[in-house]
Image (cartoon, grey):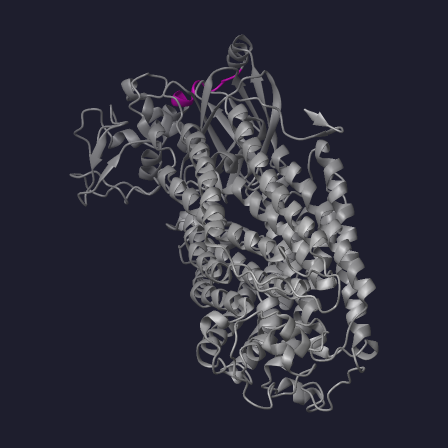
Amino acid sequence: MLDTPKLPERHYLNNGHGLKSWLLTKDHKRIAIMYLISISAMFLLGGLFAGAVRLELMTPEGDLFLADTYNKMFTMHGVVMVFFFLIPSTPAVLGNFLIPPMIGAKDLAFPRINLLSLYIFWLGAAFFFYALFAGGVDTGWTFYTPFSSFSSNTNVIPTALGAFISGFSSILTGLNFIVTIHRMRAPGLTWFRLPLFVWAHYATSLIQVLGTPVVAITIIMVFVERAFGFGIFDPTRGGDPVLFQHLFWFYSHPAVYIMILPAMGVISEIVSTFSRKTIFGYSFVAFSSLAIAVFGFIVWAHHMFVAGISTYSALVFSFLSFSVAIPSAVKTFNWAATLYKGAISFETPMLYAYGFFGLFLIGGLTGLFLATLGTDIHLHDTYFVVSHFHYIMVGGAIMGYLGGLHFWWPKLVGRMYSEFLSRVSAILVFVGFNLTFFPQFILGYMGMPRRYHAYPDEFQVLNILSSAGAGVLGIGYLLPVIYFLWSLKRGEVAGPNPWGASGLEWQIPSPPPTENFKVQPVVHGEPYEYTPHVAREANLV
Amino acid sequence: MGSFGIPLFPEQASTFARDIDALYFFIVATSAFFALAVTVAVIVFGIVYRRRHEGEVGARIEGNLPLELLWSVIPTMIAMVMFGWGASSYFHMRTPPAEALQIYAVGKQWMWKFQHLEGQREINELHVPVNRPVKVTITSEDVLHSLYFPSFRTKMDAIPGRYTQLWFEATKVGEYHIFCTEYCGTNHSGMIGKVVVMEPDDYQAWLAGGGVEGTLAERGQRLFQDLACGTCHLDTGKGRGPSLNDIVGKTVTLADGATAVVDEGYLRESIVNSQVKIVQGYQPLMPAFQGLVSEDNLVALVEYVKSLSPQATTQAPAGATAPAADPTKKN
């Protein structure tokens, strides 16, 4: 670097002070920051519940908590993590912040709706907190009927309404992204010049808009059954409990792709940037996102292979479930091929991307055991499933999210964090994660069922390993809180483009001004241009 | 079966276990191959192509169509092998042999209740003979449960208001876990038990030791009398309800013109929700017994009605109780 970069004089963070300037903002970047703070708090809360679960499972006897308390712990862990952390995570924070600058726009298409989505999210969270302080809920995050409709005597309705309400926040975010990506691209920014991060968010938004209403309707059905005694799912009133599972998984299976697709978008950006190379097979990576979004809607009954569905529908859904595996495999191969003949460096975001490769590979491949009918019968509802979906939703989605946060942090706040500590945290997360969840695959094949407060003695060794791993993982997740906060005041000033990345968002100051671009950018080239010429222009040489 | 003292899979104690474990290790091996291939590739690329000076950029390679096709088609083919193998195992697991020994299981918060045809009833313990197919017809008295035998590699949900089935043939004498694998509230993790696999002689001895109330069908017959079912369901076929002789396995035409096969599920539904599937030509006079007869007693009644169709009952080879053909059908 020729001279030390300075923070821009005016940027979105100092354009207006005081609480009101935040709460009434229409700036997508400020809304993203408020989402970041909100979901980080929820993540820590969900993590505390997980810690409680892992502590209880260190001994075979249910000796730390009462059974009811334990059941509430894993339920609230799931509810918080799924509805209030994972689903908003990458889209509401990174997507919100980055999609407008990535496509050369000043804001999202509907800035007020964007703010509304945040308020709706908070309202949903308020319902959850009401349920929490009123004594919690014990149905599992899946709210299976008829347990949730007449058996559980905990706060099912407020919790379900919390999930219902926060769903609308997700729908509005998705709607906003779809319109923005269609209508607000800079001149010259054709669909096939879009960053893959944007493609991934487009696919995610489709799921949010099309899938979320179904779970909303389902929750309303549980509500009217529980509150007014309608017979929808309860067989003693003429209902069908399995119908709930169809409706619930019609959304909640695609919801997994709401979590993982944006993370995949992040990984595409990181891999390209840190190997200074265009992404291998751009259109295959882009279309595989859409393929995952579409196929994701036709595999839901693989959650129900032992729930009394007909043999033939099980065959069909097993077959279709494999169709999701292929686009995921295609993405992975393309990322690996992108590294070939790259100019690779291993700053923290790239460490997270490598961690993502490892965990997503295991998470994706273990899905094969559950799509295959013969093995699923044995593995269904065991710890194998718990481990599989944590590898995808935590290993994949959170590695992607954290990688993205480290990648764009200098853009968000204009300053760098400690490279040393962040590398340590990336490694701790990877090691801690595997130590926590790999033993659970073995536990699952051994037959240990999920949601067990107490378990037979022979499962203890593996459970202790898992709990020890959770400790390491917890430290790995807490470290970033420390060095990110530290970086706000003390971090080295980053400059507009500390990584030498090619995207439009790196051509504006860090932190960006409220309007993102002083003049409307015009796009002439392809995405991910890394030529010696471009490198010279970016002052890299 | 241990490695470093940590067991890797449960005992292989049913005819399914070997096949499912083989399928499992096939998928493990395939997964390990792909995971290793990608891991080695990204690590080797990371080392060989590491950035050597600040201004270095990667080669301009935009993609390669043959490669894309190759790594789409090959995984698809391998996935189809997994699908086919898994589907054939599943089909086998969902098709109980006609001669299978019939046992009923009722799940309730938080216990498993088993009833044998000879009359024995047990809680959280299930005695079965070795080397003989056993068919378990499952239901629930309250919420969802799932009956899981890890050592047999099979499980099936217990669904209130419906009969589901699983079967197995134990291959090794011993005691193995029974778990509930569908979360069912407070004491879900206490809803466990053991299946005791016995030599045929021991099993016969065990059977002889119980059954103070007579066989399951006999208990059903007493209930049939207590509930005064016989006042309408006359043997002659001239009662206000249809005769129940020789109906199991038959197809009946319903009042709305639809048809139904008379199996356990139909019989159960016709007792608890008697108005739903009325046989054509009869008036909807029968009261619904929803909530009035326990699931255990319903099982006894069903078994009694089945005993009135001697050529179609489970133990007979006729195979007319073809619910076996599609055990998971929605009743």
- Residue A65 appears in the figure: no
Q: Quadrant of residue B127?
A: top right
Q: Is residue A336 magenta?
A: no
Give coordinates of residue B234: x percent, y percent.
22, 27
> Which is more toward the observer, A66 or A492?
A492
- Count of labels in the image: 0
> Which is more toward the observer, A189 or A386?
A189
A429 vs A508: above or below: above
In the image, what residue occupies the spot 74% across and 55% down?
A: A429
The overriding secondary structure of the stretch rendered in magenta is loop
Give coordinates of residue A363: x percent, y percent.
60, 48
The boundaries of the magenta stretch are B210-218
A467 vs B16: above or below: below
A133 vs B135: above or below: below
> Which is more toward the observer, A426 or A467?
A426
Give coordinates of residue B320: x percent, y percent.
28, 23
Q: Quadrant of residue A183?
A: bottom left
Instruction: Answer with left or right where residue A461 lies relative to residue B34.
Output: right
Instruction: Answer with left or right where residue A221 lies relative to residue B125.
Output: left
Work out which residue is located at the far top of the displayed protein and give it: B201
Locate the N terminus of chain B by quadrant: top right
A235 vs B61: above or below: above
Locate the C terminus of chain B by quadrant: top left
